[in-house]
Every structure is written in C-alpha cells, then in structure tokens.
Image (tube, coloured by chain):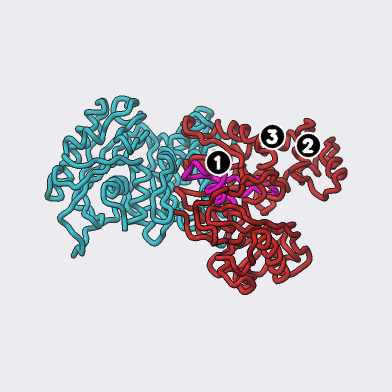
Chain colours: A cyan, B red
Amino acid sequence: MDEATSVGTGETKEPSHDTSKVWGGIDLGGTKIEAVVIDEAGTVLGRARHPTPGDGDPSDVVQGVYGALKEAAQAAGTTPQRLVGVGVGAPGSVNANDGTLAHVGNVGRGWEEPYPVAADLGDLVGSRVVLGNDVQVAVAAEYRLGAGRPYRSILGLWWGTGVGGGLVLDGVPWRGRGAAGEIGHMVVKPGGARCGCGRRGCMEAYAGRASMERKARKAVRQGEKTMLFDLMHKKGRPRLTSSIWDKALQQEDPLATWLIERAVRMLGAGVASAINLLDVEAVILGGGLGTRLGPAYAGRIHDAMSPHIFVPERQPPVLVAELGELSGAIGAALLSQPPMK
Amino acid sequence: MDEATSVGTGETKEPSHDTSKVWGGIDLGGTKIEAVVIDEAGTVLGRARHPTPGDGDPSDVVQGVYGALKEAAQAAGTTPQRLVGVGVGAPGSVNANDGTLAHVGNVGRGWEEPYPVAADLGDLVGSRVVLGNDVQVAVAAEYRLGAGRPYRSILGLWWGTGVGGGLVLDGVPWRGRGAAGEIGHMVVKPGGARCGCGRRGCMEAYAGRASMERKARKAVRQGEKTMLFDLMHKKGRPRLTSSIWDKALQQEDPLATWLIERAVRMLGAGVASAINLLDVEAVILGGGLGTRLGPAYAGRIHDAMSPHIFVPERQPPVLVAELGELSGAIGAALLSQPPMK
C-alpha cells in the first residue's frame, strides 16, 4: 500500500451525523506510518505521515505512531486524548485479543517477539486501542467507503510487495481464527516457484513484487536485457517500486511485460479459485501494484479469471480500490468504531 | 453421497424438546431418493429409500419424491400432510428463491429447464417446501449433528463422483450468491487435466471419481494392467464405485494406488488453499469416496495439505463425516426448520 496515488475521501459539506466524536487510525508500514482522524461517517478530518523509526525497538515504533497520531489530531483540530478510540492496522502477527503484535520483521530493528502495542499506545492516548491486520482493515474500509460500497460481500486482492487478501461476507469482515485472507498463499502450481514464505507454488511466488524482482534479477544475471534496473538507479531507489514496473510496462520492456503477464495469469487462476469457493459479488484490487496498475490491469485480471470461473454468467467485476494510500489508516480507525449498522 | 456406509444418528431416549413437530427431508440423487422425517433436535424418526424414476420427466420425479416421503412419514407414525415443512437437497442449479430446480442432467430423463419443485411438492404435502444444494445441506447437517459439532466454522469436502464443498462460517451456512462451495473447481494446475466441467486444471479433474475412471480407462487402453475393471465386472457394476476403488487399494493395485495418491496430493493443495483463504477450524470429509476411504485417507489428506498451510501450527484437522448416507436428507430437513439458535 506504499504507492497509492489517489485519495477518494473528501470532507462532507453538511454532516448529518454527530461530528463531535472522532476516532484515530494508524497504518503501520515498514517505511512509513500513516495516521488519520475520522468522524463517525468515516470522513477524514486530519492526516499525517511519518517515517517508521528504522533502527528503533518496538517501544520507539509506538512513540513514532503516537507522534503521527498527534499531528493528525492537530490537523483535525483536536488532540490524541480526545479520540474516542484508536485502531492500528499492521503487518505481522496481530493478536487482537491481547493487543500484541509480533513477527513484524520489516518494521523497526527486527521485531519478532509479541509487544503490547495496544496497552502502550493506550497509555499515551488514554483511550481504547484495537489492532487489526493491515490488509483486512484496508479491505473493510473499501467495503464501507470505497469501491465495495454497492456490495454486501467482497474479496480484496492487495497486490504489492506480497499478495494479501481480505474478505467481507454479508457485511461482516471475515477473519477466521485471525489468519484468514492469505490469498497470496493459495497454491496455483504445486511444486512450482519458491515463495518468500518458503513454500512452493503460492500465487505470491509469481505475482508478489518481491518475487518478481528476484526473478528479474536472476534473468539479468543470465544475460537478459531490461530497463527495470536502469529506471531503479535513475530514481535512486533500492527496490523495483510499483511506479518503476508501471514505467517499464509503458515502455513495453519485454522482461517486465513477461513477468507481469505471468503474474496476471496466476492471479487469475488463484482469484477464480477463491470465487468458485466463495461466490462473492466483487473483487476489489488494491495494494501498491494493484492501485498503480489497476486502471490498465483490472480488466486483464478479470479476463485471466474467466477460463476458470465455474458459473461464467456470474463472474464478479474486478474494481480498483478508491481510497488509495489512506485505505489502511481509515480502515484501522473504522475498526475502533462501534460495529456497522 | 451414494455409498456412505454408516448412520450416526440414533433416536434419543428421553427427548427434552417438543416431539410433536416433525419435518421432512429429501436427498434427490441420480439413482435414488433418500427421505427422512426428523424431530426438532434432528433425530431421525422414519426413513425410506426409493429409486429415482430413470426415464420420467420432472413431474414424475416429484411424484417419486412424494412416494419416498410418504413412506418415511409412515415409518415415523405420521403423514406427509402433518409435516411442518419439507426440505429438498438436490444437485444441479437450485433457485432457492423461486423454488425451481434446473440442469439436473443425471436425474430423470434429462432435466434442463427450471421446474417448480417447491410449488409442485408443496401442493402434495400442503406445507412449505424449500430447496437447497445437496452438498451444502449435507455439510450443514454435519455441522449441527455430525463431525462438525465441536466447531463454529467448517469446510466440507465432499469427495465422490465429483468433488463438492460446503461452508459453515461462524455458525451460518455460507452460500454466496447461491453457488458457493465449488471447491472441486478450484484450480490446482493451470492448463492441467481436462475436467468434467470442460475447464482445465480443476481439483475435480484429478480427484473426482468420474475423472479418475476416465484416466483409468485410458491407461488400460494404453496397455496398463489393473484389477479395477475386473472388480467392476465381477460386481456387475457399470462404473468404478467407491467400494471398487477401496478394494483395489487394499490389494495394492498399482494404477488405483497411483491415481488415488495423485488425487490426495491435489486435494491437499486445493484444500490448503481454501484454509489459507478462510482459516476455518476443521475440514469434514464426506461423499461416497470420502466416507468409504476416510478412515484410512483423512490423515493422508491432512498430510498432503501440510506443505501448503500458511500458519502450520494452526492446521485444522480433517475429520470423516459421521451421518453417512443420511447426511443429505437430514440436512435438507434441517433447512426447512427455523434457523438454529
């Protein structure tokens, strides 16, 4: 979700709801902390973005989260202490019950052991803090305020460094026993490509940005030509970002095109499998690559699903996420609100 | 579900519930109609099995259903007219809203157009008739009265002629827009084996009994040796039934063993994908092959899932269905009852 380009929420002109109550939301990522303050209807009243403390321990990260939240609250004309509740969306292992977060390898200085984020941050803000999975809360935000609004049941496909997923079924976010939505680790080819998770044949092993970069580096070592890494150096980036992939595709770079087409084919097979199992109404395409390439590629993913859809006349649309880079933070804030009506 | 071997429901000795209300359930299959009458707790008070009219049109099939229901009611000491409601579980395209059934190619004399089963049968019994998908209702029965009792969320894997599925999520059967549960058409190998549905690489193309029989016949034409068809002729059957597969496996027939091992490998990949997506608590293994081979093969399916499970320490158990050949009829009857508490 690091490269979303548009923000779909605007301030409502004449709010018909109680505007005195406000909630805070945090999207905790490996490189940045995105904070928002929203009202009851989900309107963003203030926002702030801080870099994630790169070499701190979990308590430093919590301080960084508090700093971002404070700035977002100021922008909304309030203080963190006046928030009714705060939600935090994070990668890694979220334990929503005891409010701890673990295995967040890419946040701070190697964060493996469970850390009581909810209690720590709760002491600072003086209100209840709830934790959720970053993709699940982003999908819930799209369901309520974004591209999923017309539907009761959606599958979120978060296409970025990895491939994440989230489900809303008949209006309720489905989390299983806490780990639901790992659509990137659906098997699209038993014994196939090695995935970042260590297993083989996962959808993410073909479609995740990190996997595609590994494959591209290998191809270059084997003598293939591509502009991908030239673009990367020109932009001074250490990694192939979504905008670099986008640029290379626009320039019809053969390696980039081949890798993305393979990714789309595998996304088609995996998402079609999910649809055959769940028969939801729509697929919402988000994440860094999904948001960046969505306008051009949502239709291609839809087409790649088609040959595998069991009830062809009811194939769901693939729609690009609308809330952009704020979906995670807004979704986290919604998580701290009372359940939807 | 045509070859289940055990029935797990018995009559309760001292019912603590209202025994004056009874419901009827029908499992409409290609070869037989299974009928039950149950009380509020799901106890089977009467049952009957009639052959499905082989060369009749849909109205003849409805008459056959009524005949089976009448006999089950008599066995329960009542009449069809005294049933509070009747549920019918059927293959094909069930339209639960308008009570019609279509595309039931293997029932009667080619049944394609929607036929108003609920209205027709309702006129005969004088109470409300509801329709449901045969596998979905069987899984719901296992959830409430069978192997799924300890859980709130289960995935039913119905391994038989085809590979069907059913979901109960947090206590509620999940049907999507009506077509959920088609786990057999999850893609385990893009571009792979041709499936009975016409597509390629579906789990059913490797694990469905019909697909395995096609593959076995092809192997024999190519000179491979197997006892499968000798057993079939000896038993005077036109098809490789589950008991024939079981026998051949016990005799370590190489072709049968190879085909079943391949099926188990593909079931493992597909079901693991479903678990990574949904994170349910348990997998219930039913259907003709599932019930027959379950005691020996549930563990093997569990093992075949293991390499693909994203949260290994939370891999769900694979449990054999307990209601046997009556699960479909009981589930259909439950469908006609008020919602579970």
Same chain check for tags 1 and 3 = yes
Q: Is residue A207 visible?
A: no
Q: Quadrant of the C terminus of chain A?
A: bottom left
Q: Earlier in the sequence, mark 2 or mark 3?
A: 2
Q: Residue furthest front?
A: B14
Same chain check for tags 2 and 3 = yes
Spot occupied by residue B239 in the image (x, y as percentages of width and height): 79, 48
Q: Residues within 10 Å of mark 2 (few under 14, many from 20)?
A: some
Spatial CA distance of label 2 from label 1 is 25 Å
Q: Quadrant of the N terminus of chain A?
A: top left
Spot occupied by residue A224 in the image (x, y as percentages of width and height): 52, 33
Relative to B155, A208 lies left or right? left
Marks 2, 3: nearer the viewer: 2
Please give the residue where the numbered disc 1 appears in the rendered image.
B283
Q: Amino acid at mark 2?
A: Lys
Spot occupied by residue B3 in the image (x, y as percentages of width and height): 72, 47
Spatial CA distance of label 2 from label 3 is 15 Å
Note whether B223 is above or below B241 in the view shown. above
* Front in this rendered view, residue B253 or B117: B117
Residue range in magenta is B138-165
Circles 2, 1 touching at the beta carbon (< 8 Å): no
Q: Earlier in the sequence, mark 2 or mark 1?
A: 2
Query: In which quarter of the view is residue B228 placed?
Result: top right
Relative to A184, A110 lies left or right? left
Q: Amino acid at mark 3?
A: Glu
Which numbered tag is attached to residue B247? 2
